[in-house]
Amino acid sequence: MPNESIIKVFDGKNVRVVWNEEEEKYYFSVADIVQVLTDTVNPRDYIKKMLRRDPELKSKWGTICPPVEMLAPDGKHRKTQAADLEGIFRIIQSVPSKKAEPIKQWNAALGARLYHPSVPATI
């Protein structure tokens, strides 16, 4: 699975993104997206609580968030729970946040750039 790792900045925070050439999809680190949405210091704990609150999301978690190799903060490549654009939109639904709409627009702009290369790369 050839991946191109990218780090994007949203609201002053790094969001790890990987382009999967084979699938022609972007995958986003779920922990990074949850941290942006919630400002939590421990996104893993927040994800656990989110899955307890949303049984439907929990039942589909493995499908929505496959492990994808990404660059970790220590500089090593590790498998990280990640989601494509559709999965990220589903996760956003489960997180009450004022930042939900801006991050949806950010993701939509990235998706538009992917499927319509003439769209300016503002991401």
Image (spheres, helix red, strand yellow):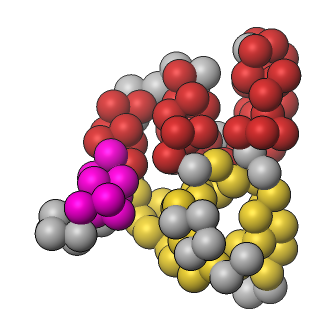
Residue 117: quadrant of the picture: bottom left
User: Is 6 left, or right, of 64 in this rendering?
Assistant: left
Where residue 5 appears, x then y in whole percent?
Answer: 58, 79
Where residue 45 appears, x then y in whole percent?
Answer: 82, 37
User: Is 113 left, or right, of 38 in this rendering?
Assistant: left
The residue closer to the viewer here, 97 or 101, is 101
Residue 78: quadrant of the picture: bottom right
From this viewpoint, is residue 58 visible?
yes
Residue 27: quadrant of the picture: bottom right
User: Is 101 left, or right, of 90 in this rendering?
Assistant: left
Where residue 116 appears, x then y in whole percent?
Answer: 24, 61
Question: Is 120 a magenta residue?
Answer: no
From this viewpoint, is residue 41 visible?
no
Using the image, determine if residue 107 lies above or below residue 15: above
Question: Is 111 a magenta residue?
Answer: yes
Residue found at x 73% / y 22%: 57
* Magenta extent: 108-116
Q: Residue furthest front?
A: 22
